Amino acid sequence: DADVTQTPRNRITKTGKRIMLECSQTKGHDRMYWYRQDPGLGLRLIYYSFDVKDINKGEISDGYSVSRQAQAKFSLSLESAIPNQTALYFCATREGTGKATQYFGPGTRLTVL
Amino acid sequence: GIQVEQSPPDLILQEGANSTLRCNFSDSVNNLQWFHQNPWGQLINLFYIPSGTKQNGRLSATTVATERYSLLYISSSQTTDSGVYFCAVARSYIPTFGRGTSLIVHP
């Protein structure tokens, strides 16, 4: 969905570097999520946020941190990247109540050498 | 947490064939979605279906929440249906994905 954008779309970096992945949405949703996808493992939840003041760890938060700068922006940081963080990263949003469809960004392909 | 199992893990079809993909989950959920990930990696919403049956063109889905499973039906498959199909379930807005069914449709 064009309403959820991620930057950069592709990134190659070296071990030990700090990396920030950014997500912006124009859907007006309160709930935002970061996932990583590895081949054969589906999507796993890293962090999620239900509003600007709410940050929660997901299944695999070690080695990652997040910042919810505004309702529309949710950033994921790798403080010191390592090769096993090489993956496809997705940001998603969800409506707050009622029908709770998730909408995904296009993904960021991150390679850590 | 909730366990989500999808079957089959891989499926190869000839164009025009029908198929059924299954999603089993281990606990009660209040929402369930089916997604298609195309060969370029994009995740596309197919259905939001916590219960009942829905249809959209050649695709339809049924969720039997009391028995903790959902089915995705693809009829008259086309090569553009190729990709990975994911089921995602959630309770209290915290989603869990299955590992997906990889579908290849040959012309």
Image: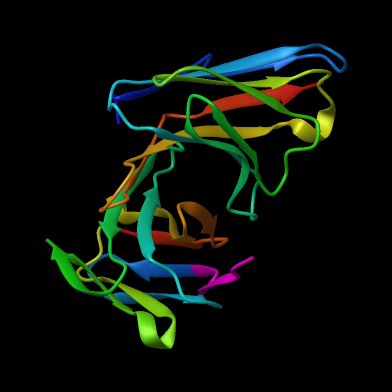
Q: Quadrant of residue B82?
A: bottom left
Relative vertical location of residue B26 with respect to residue B1 in this rendering, above or below: below
> How many labels sit on residues?
0
Q: Quadrant of residue A86?
A: top right
- Residue A98's x, y, as percent? 26, 53
Name the outermost residue toward the right.
A16
Q: Image point 49% across, 29% down: which residue?
A: A107
Quadrant where the C terminus of chain A lies?
top right
Q: Image point 28% across, 54% down: which residue?
A: B46
Quadrant where the N terminus of chain A lies?
top left
Judging depth in this view, the residue of B78 and A7 nearest the camera is A7
Judging depth in this view, the residue of A5 and A67 nearest the camera is A67
- Residue A90's x, y, as percent? 52, 34
Colour scheme in the image? rainbow
Relative vertical location of residue A85 with respect to residue A100 in this rendering, above or below: above
Relative vertical location of residue B6 with respect to residue A60 in this rendering, above or below: below
* Left or right of A35, for residue B74: left
Q: Quadrant of residue A80?
A: top right
Residue B107 covered by magenta stretch: no
- Residue A45's x, y, as percent? 61, 45
Q: Image point 57% across, 61% down: which residue?
A: B99
Judging depth in this view, the residue of A45 and A90 nearest the camera is A45
Name the outermost residue toward the left.
B57
* Left or right of B79, for residue A66: right
- Residue B17's x, y, as percent? 27, 73
Name the outermost residue toward the front.
A53
Q: Where are the magenta residues, as a range?
A: B1-10
Q: Image point 71% across, 24% down: which residue?
A: A111
